[in-house]
Image (cartoon, rainbow, N blue to C red):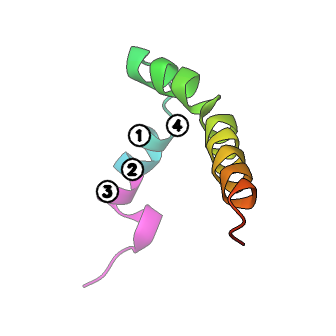
Amino acid sequence: MVTGIAMHTEIGKSAALLGHQPQVATPLRYRLARVGRPLPWLCLAVTAVVAAEALHRGRP
C-alpha cells in the first residue's frame, strides 16, 4: 500500500532537511571562482590574437 509519494515519504523528508543546509564556501570553490573570473577574458584575448594573425597573413 502506498502511503505517500515524493516529498511525503521518509526519504523525501530527509531530502528536504538536507536541502535546507547553508552553502559553505570551501577553499576549492573559492579557488575555482578566482580562476574562473579571468578565464573568459583570456579566451577572448587569445581569439583576438589568432584572428589578427590570420587577417595579417591574408586568411579569412
Q: Nearer the viewer, mark 4 or mark 3?
A: 4
Which callout, 2 or 3, points at the residue further toward the start of the chain? 3
Q: Residue at x 65, y 50 (%)?
A: 47
Q: Which mark is residue 20?
A: 4
Range drawn in magenta: 1-13
Amino acid type at image mark 3: Glu
Query: How far is disc 4 from disc 3 in space, using C-alphas?
Result: 16 Å
Whether label 1 touches label 3, CB < 8 Å:
no
- Asked if residue 51 lies left or right of residue 43, the reply is right
Which callout, 1 or 3, points at the residue further toward the start of the chain? 3
- Asked if residue 18 lies left or right of residue 34, the reply is left
Q: Is residue 12 above or below residue 29?
A: below
Whether label 2 touches label 3, CB < 8 Å:
no
Amino acid type at image mark 1: Leu
**Number of numbered markers:** 4
Nearer to me, 51 or 35: 51
Query: How far is disc 1 from disc 3 in space, using C-alphas?
Result: 13 Å
Q: Is residue 54 above or below residue 46?
A: below
Percent across and percent down for residue 53 are 67, 51
Q: Is residue 17 above or below residue 36?
A: below
Q: Is residue 24 above or below residue 12?
A: above
Percent across and percent down for residue 17 are 44, 40
